[in-house]
């Protein structure tokens, strides 16, 4: 499409135009010499953009100087913008002044760019190019200013291998890399440096990694920090390896190794547009050449197609989430779908067709047409639709210089957007927008369609037709019950009444016509598949609450109608587990997980889990806490479902179920810690270590109990302890400093808040902090030193038992290693065995008295093995806790001689070590392992049935007696 036409301001915006003309009343003499076109443009731009009006009102002299320069009416020559930034920074000798000058210049240029965009003197390409050139100049010249001053303070970084001075390489990703920045975009950066080494020329040299980390932090602050002058660019570093939890800078070798070993499909997409925007350009070209094989495979990469389909599902999930429909970037038919189409061809064919190895999207589309990948008519529609959407994006952002892609709700901003886009009213604009979005979405679906989805099209259009009269109540009760009984329902009348209750219930009565049509199309299919199950009565009982829950969000009914495989998997899982049925009814977004059978029954490994979560959070603005919390919760729900489904299908044994649930918790805790840390640092600054250096983060989350022992089950809570190694007295370096003790306490409180807050998607985990030093009366966060002193001098024996299962889940590797040393020293001290046996036995007796089955004296009475009484798998004699206490006793008793007993935190591997060391007969160690796994497997199955961990007393006789025998062998009583 060509530039949107200029149309007259609507009446609703005339008062804003009149106000704009008053902004320069005190400079009437200067205005007299203005051409009429500029005066008219002032009224127009001031009416359409609050940002421009505010900038003029704030500093009219700066605006008049800009107008007098003639830059409002002309395009800048190549390189001119960089020359201007260099001139602005000339003579600057103070870091705060650097930030002030950059921000004031940015505001001047932002005003000029918006002015030219809204007056249609600049097309899309000029606007994006100017914004990208502005970012390039600010990033690189700020770096060039900071680097020599950083070297004066910390020395010059020298490469260990080359012996040459080292410079940072700043990669611009995404729209910056492709010269496609929008009017209020953040900039995605990755920092790298050529090689390791240390600085020279100072008394206390720094490792190159530390040097460039500190330099990178200064550069980010120069660009990103919000001051009275605003900001230069919001900087997003989350596309780097490991996201926010990874180091800020990487050596080239580390970057290459990461992408070779762990690079994800989405990181290939991100790296397509990578470009050197600052620092050492020659070294940057070398780095991009090193990474090119990761992005572009030398063969025709059809493996990318499956990745595209997986990403398609993620996109569809986002579209279904609340509020996504009006997002012209992320919603259906939005900007991202055009980008997705182009990048799909780049990844599949770019390794062999070098013409596709380029960054700007419009150039890629032209190549796709020229090389015959897409027909000219398709490319023309994609190009025109993309340009229209980008102009809309700029219109939305020009109003207030705000990063948004959401269509406005209020009448004034709607009038502004319509006017900017050349329409007389909102309805006319919306009609054209919807046209382009529908065309983009159609092409998007064609490019990534799965051919298997087309098989059988036109067949089976009457699936379940025999059930339609029953659902529509065209049959009387007797005929309906007869049909249900003939189909295999054991209680046809109950089933009939359940269907009638649904049909006449308030949820169904309240749905609109299209929703009712979708329900009527779905229910016969549901009944047809239900009767194929072993127990259709149970299936109906468990699935109908879900149908009722989603009746008013009928997109989910369409999902199940159009995907018979997903519906079949839903029925199988609900029949197998009421826990799964309840989860899906409470959180219908989980239905998306049923679409891909391969993913559903094959949960990812730990590194893939962590990478997938980072990927999801990377797409969310850092300041959107609500969406981040929802994303974390949906991630947990989805992967918990996948683990449960795999357990039911028999593709995951018990030990692997616990592994996956534990890995899931660790991935979530890693991101929660990073999120809480960013929030706290942005508010208070960074805490300090005792030597005055900044913490990074010098904080760990230690897991006890099931999460520490890698034995999480469905619905388990997390036993956590927080430990830091900062200086509790030293103040943070922020604008609102607090001492280190307060900082880390508030960090702990923030982590608990993020984990336990109830949102529409529930909470992440229940958290139990009572195992910290001094329990509920102790400090929420302990220093490492205080933790060690408590464990050595004040802790009870039962606390040392708990410490056996403690391990670092996430946080600082340095502090984690120090914690492990403390743990080993505390647990490995020699003990009085008689006293130890007495204290362990006494604690176990208390637990049996309080938590065991009273009818059987906690499994010790003569009737304990009768079928009429219950056996508590965990608390009764011969149960899970007895095995755990025996393992803990053995570790405390003998670890000073056999330190390998402290290598693990899970009971199975500690038993391996006990057997290998001859401390237990290997046959007894294996017996305890098998019994322990049998108990836990039974408990898992009961949890999926939403039942307590209790079985009848006539079960597990041999196992219970064996455990009780070994309890006596160890002289516990």
Image (tube, rainbow, N blue to C red):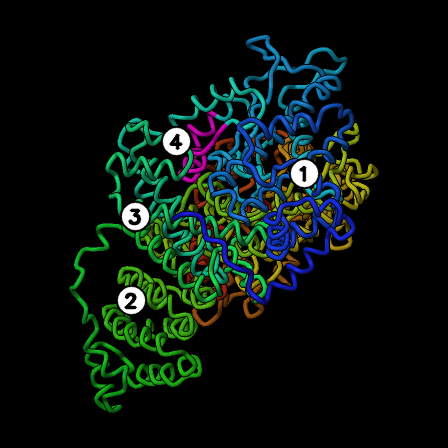
Above or below 722: residue 296: above
Image location of residue 588, percent across then percent down: 43, 64
Which sits earlier in the primary sequence, circle 2 or circle 3?
3
Q: Residue sitting at 29 percent across and 77 percent down?
A: 520
Looking at the image, is mark 3 or mark 4 earlier in the sequence? 4
The numbered dot on residue 68 is 1
Residue at the far top: name it.
163
In this view of the protein, which residue sits in the foreground, 282 or 457?
282
Mark 3 or 4: the one toward you? 4
Q: 558 above or below 73?
A: below
Residue 161 placement (x, y as % from top left): 55, 10
Contact (Cβ within 8 Å) of mark 1 with mark 2 = no
Cα gap from disc 3 to disc 1, whole angstroms: 52 Å
Q: Find disc 4 in the rendering and name its residue.
A: 358
In the depicted view, which residue is nearer to us: 235 or 366? 366
SS class, disc 4: loop
Look at the numbered discs 2 and 4 and tell me whether their residues touch, using CB distance below 8 Å: no
Is disc 2 in contact with disc 3, using a CB cutoff of under 8 Å?
A: no
Where does the magenta region start and end? Answer: 256-275
Can residue 878 be seen from the camera position used here?
no
Which residue matches tag 2?
561
Mark closer to the chain start, 4 or 1: 1
Q: SS at mark 3? A: loop
Q: Secondary structure at mark 2?
A: helix
Give the mark toward the camera: 2 or 3.
Answer: 3
Q: Is residue 555 above or below residue 309?
A: below
């Amino acid at each position: 499409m060509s530039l949107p036409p200029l149309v007259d301001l609507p009446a609703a915006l005339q008062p804003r135009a009149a106000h704009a003309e008053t902004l320069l009343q005190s400079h009437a003499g200067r205005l007299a010499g203005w051409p009429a076109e500029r005066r008219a443009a002032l009224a127009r731009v001031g009416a359409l953009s609050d940002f421009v009006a505010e900038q003029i009102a704030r500093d009219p002299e700066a605006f008049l100087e800009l107008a007098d320069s003639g830059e409002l009416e002309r395009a800048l020559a190549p390189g001119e913008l960089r020359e201007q930034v260099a001139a602005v920074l000339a003579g600057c000798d103070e870091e705060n002044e650097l930030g002030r000058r950059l921000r004031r210049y940015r505001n001047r240029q932002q005003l000029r760019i918006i002015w030219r965009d809204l007056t249609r003197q600049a097309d899309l390409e000029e606007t994006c190019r100017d914004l990208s050139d502005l970012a390039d100049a600010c990033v690189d010249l700020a770096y060039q200013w900071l680097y020599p001053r950083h070297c004066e303070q910390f020395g010059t970084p020298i490469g260990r291998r080359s012996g040459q001075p080292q410079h940072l390489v700043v990669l611009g990703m995404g729209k910056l890399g492709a010269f496609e920045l929008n009017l209020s975009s953040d900039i995605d950066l990755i920092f790298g440096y050529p090689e390791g080494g240390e600085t020279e020329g100072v008394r206390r040299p720094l490792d190159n990694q530390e040097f460039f980390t500190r330099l990178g932090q200064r550069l980010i602050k120069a660009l990103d920090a919000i001051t009275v002058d605003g900001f230069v660019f919001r900087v997003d570093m989350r596309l780097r390896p490991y996201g926010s939890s990874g180091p800020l800078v990487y050596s080239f070798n580390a970057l290459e190794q990461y992408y070779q070993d762990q690079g994800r499909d989405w990181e290939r997409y991100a790296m397509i547009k990578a470009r050197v925007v600052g620092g050492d350009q020659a070294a940057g070209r070398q780095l991009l050449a090193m990474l090119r094989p990761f992005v572009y495979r030398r063969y025709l990469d059809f493996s990318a197609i499956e990745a595209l389909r997986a990403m398609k599902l993620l996109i569809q999930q986002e579209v279904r989430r609340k509020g996504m429909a009006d997002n012209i970037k992320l919603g259906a038919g939005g900007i991202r779908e055009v980008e997705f189409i182009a990048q799909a061809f780049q990844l599949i064919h770019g390794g062999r067709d070098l013409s596709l190895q380029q960054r700007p999207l419009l150039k890629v589309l032209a190549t796709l047409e020229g090389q015959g990948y897409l027909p000219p008519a398709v490319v023309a529609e994609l190009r025109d639709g993309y340009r229209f959407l980008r102009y809309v994006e700029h219109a939305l952002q020009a109003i207030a210089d705000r990063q948004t892609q959401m269509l406005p709700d209020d009448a004034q901003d709607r009038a502004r957007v319509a006017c900017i886009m050349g329409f007389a009213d909102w309805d006319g604009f919306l009609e054209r927008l919807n046209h382009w979005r529908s065309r983009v979405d159609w092409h998007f679906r064609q490019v990534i369609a799965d051919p298997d989805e087309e098989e059988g099209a036109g067949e089976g259009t009457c699936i379940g037709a025999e059930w339609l009269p029953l659902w529509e109540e065209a049959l009387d009760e007797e005929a309906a019950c007869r049909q249900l009984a003939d189909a295999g329902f054991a209680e046809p009348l109950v089933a009939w009444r359940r269907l009638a209750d649904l049909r006449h219930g308030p949820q169904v009565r309240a749905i609109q016509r299209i929703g009712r049509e979708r329900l009527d199309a779905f229910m016969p299919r549901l009944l047809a598949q239900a009767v194929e199950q072993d127990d259709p009565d149970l299936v109906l009982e468990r699935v109908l609450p879900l149908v009722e829950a989603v009746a008013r969000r009928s997109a989910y009914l369409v999902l199940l109608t159009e995907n018979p495989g997903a519906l079949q998997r839903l029925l199988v899982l609900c029949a197998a587990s009421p826990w799964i049925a309840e989860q899906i009814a409470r959180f219908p977004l989980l239905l998306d997980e049923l679409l891909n059978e391969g993913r559903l029954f094959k949960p990812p490994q730990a590194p893939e889990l962590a990478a997938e979560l980072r990927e999801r959070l990377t797409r969310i603005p850092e300041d959107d806490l609500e969406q981040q919390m929802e994303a974390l919760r949906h991630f947990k729900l989805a992967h918990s479902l996948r683990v449960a489904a795999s357990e039911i299908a028999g593709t995951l044994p018990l030990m692997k179920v616990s592994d996956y649930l534990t890995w899931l918790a660790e991935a979530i805790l890693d991101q929660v810690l990073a999120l809480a840390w960013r929030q706290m640092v942005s508010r208070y600054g960074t805490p300090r270590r005792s030597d005055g250096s900044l913490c990074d983060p010098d904080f760990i989350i230690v897991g006890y109990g099931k999460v520490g022992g890698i034995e999480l089950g469905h619905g388990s809570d997390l036993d956590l302890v927080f430990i830091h190694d900062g200086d509790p007295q030293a103040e943070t370096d922020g604008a609102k400093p607090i001492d280190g003790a307060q900082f880390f306490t508030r960090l702990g409180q923030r982590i608990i808040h993020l984990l336990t807050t109830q949102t529409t998607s529930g909470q992440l985990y229940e958290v139990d902090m009572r195992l910290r030093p001094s329990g509920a009366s102790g400090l929420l966060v302990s220093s490492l030193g205080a933790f060690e002193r408590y464990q050595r001098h004040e802790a009870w024996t039962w606390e040392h038992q708990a410490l056996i299962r403690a391990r670092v889940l996430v946080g600082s590797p340095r502090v984690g290693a120090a914690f492990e040393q403390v743990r080993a020293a505390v647990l490995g001290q020699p003990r009085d065995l008689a006293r130890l046996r007495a204290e362990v036995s006494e604690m176990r007796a208390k637990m049996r008295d309080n938590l065991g089955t009273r009818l059987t004296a906690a499994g010790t009475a003569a009737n304990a093995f009768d079928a009429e009484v219950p056996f508590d798998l965990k608390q009764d004699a011969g149960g899970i806790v007895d095995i755990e206490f025996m393992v803990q006793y053995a570790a405390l008793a003998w670890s000073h001689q056999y330190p390998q007993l402290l290598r693990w935190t899970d009971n199975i591997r500690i038993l391996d070590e006990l057997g290998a060391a001859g401390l237990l007969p290997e046959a007894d160690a294996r017996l305890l392992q098998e019994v322990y796994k049998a108990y836990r497997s039974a408990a898992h199955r009961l949890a999926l049935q939403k039942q307590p961990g209790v079985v009848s007393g006539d079960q597990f006789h041999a196992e219970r007696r064996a455990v009780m025998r070994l309890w006596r062998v160890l002289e516990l009583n």
